[in-house]
Image: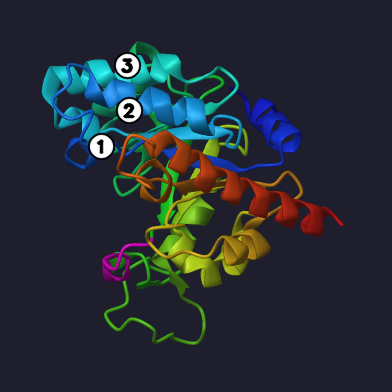
Amino acid sequence: MTRQQLVEQINSKKSYLCVGLDTDIDKLPAHLKGTNNAVVEFNKAIIDATKAHCVSYKINTAFYESQGLKGWEAMQETLAYIPYTHFTIADAKRGDIGNTSAQYAKTFFEVLPFDAITVAPYMGEDSVRPFLEYENKVTIVLGLTSNAGSNDFQQLLVSPYNESLSMVPNITQGNTEKRLYEHVLERVSSWGTVDNLMFVVGATRASDLENIRSIIPDHFLLVPGVGAQGGSLEEVSRFGLNKEAGLLVNASRAIIFAGGNEDFAIQAQKIAQSYHVEMQSYLVDFRN
C-alpha cells in the first residue's frame, strides 16, 4: 500500500486507528486456550470486529516468534487474513549491518509481504538503507519512544560540532545542542522521503509532538502508547495531525483484550468504535 492509498483510506473512513495484534497466548480467552489454532482464531475474530474502524494493523512479531514455527505460521496466516485495504506493519524493530538488514527486509517485505516494518536506527544509515530500497514499502524508524528507558539515550544532548553526547542531560551549552532524538529525526529524514519513511513517536511523549512536527512536518508518525499505556488521543491528535492526517495511532491491549470471555470480539469492536468516533471529531476540528 502506498502513502497516497493510506491517506485515501484515512479520508474515506475518517479514522487513523491502527490495531496492534500483540496476541499474548497467555491472555487468550479461556474457551480458546488449548485449541489447535487459537492465536489465528483469536486474530481473525479481532480483525472481523475492528476492520470497519481502523486503517492499519500492526503485528508485534515477538509474540509470534516466541512460539517457534507455529508462531511464524500464525503470523503468516494472520497477515494473509488482513484486508488489502488496511496498511500492515511488522513491529519487528530490526536493524543490523547492511547484508543482515537486507535479509530482514526480504523476510518482512517479500516472504511475509508487510507494507511496513519498524527499524532501530542506532547503527546508522547503512543499517537502514536496505529497507528503503524497496518500492512501495515503508520503513518506520524509532524516533522518540514512550518507555521509561528512553531517557537513557534519546533525551541526551548532542553537540552539533563533534556530535558527542553531553554527560549532563538537560544542561545546554549556549543553546546549541539538540536532543539525540531530534538529531535522529533530522538525519534519518534525509535518507528517504515522506513516501517511504515514517517515525515512531510514543503517545506518552505527546508534549514533544509539537517540536517533532517542527522537524518533520510532513512524515507519518506511528504513535503507540494510547490506551493501556496511558497516552492521550486528544493530545496526540492536537499536536500530531497534519494536512494529510499524518498519524497512525496504535492501540493494542486496550482493544484486543478489552474482554476476556466469549464476547471478546464484541468488546474489542466497542473500544475500536469509540476510538474511531473520537478520531472523526478531531479530523473535523483540525480541517475546519
Image color mode = rainbow
Q: Which residue is identified by label 3?
A: 76
- Dot 1: element: loop
**Span shown in magenta:** 146-152
Number of the label disc, if any, that sits on residue 164 = none
Earlier-in-chain disc, 3 versus 1:
1
Residue 53, position in %: x, y?
A: 60, 37
Q: Is residue 102 at all visible to an observer of this figure?
A: no
Quadrant for residue 43, please give it. Answer: top left
Q: CA distance from mark 3 to mark 1?
A: 22 Å
Circle 2 SS class: helix
In the picture provided, is 13 more to the left or to the right than 255?
right
Q: Quadrant of the N terminus?
A: top right
Q: Position of residue 119 (x, y in %)?
A: 36, 40
Given residues 52 and 288, the one toward you in this image is 52
* Picture layout, residue 141 above or below residue 101: below
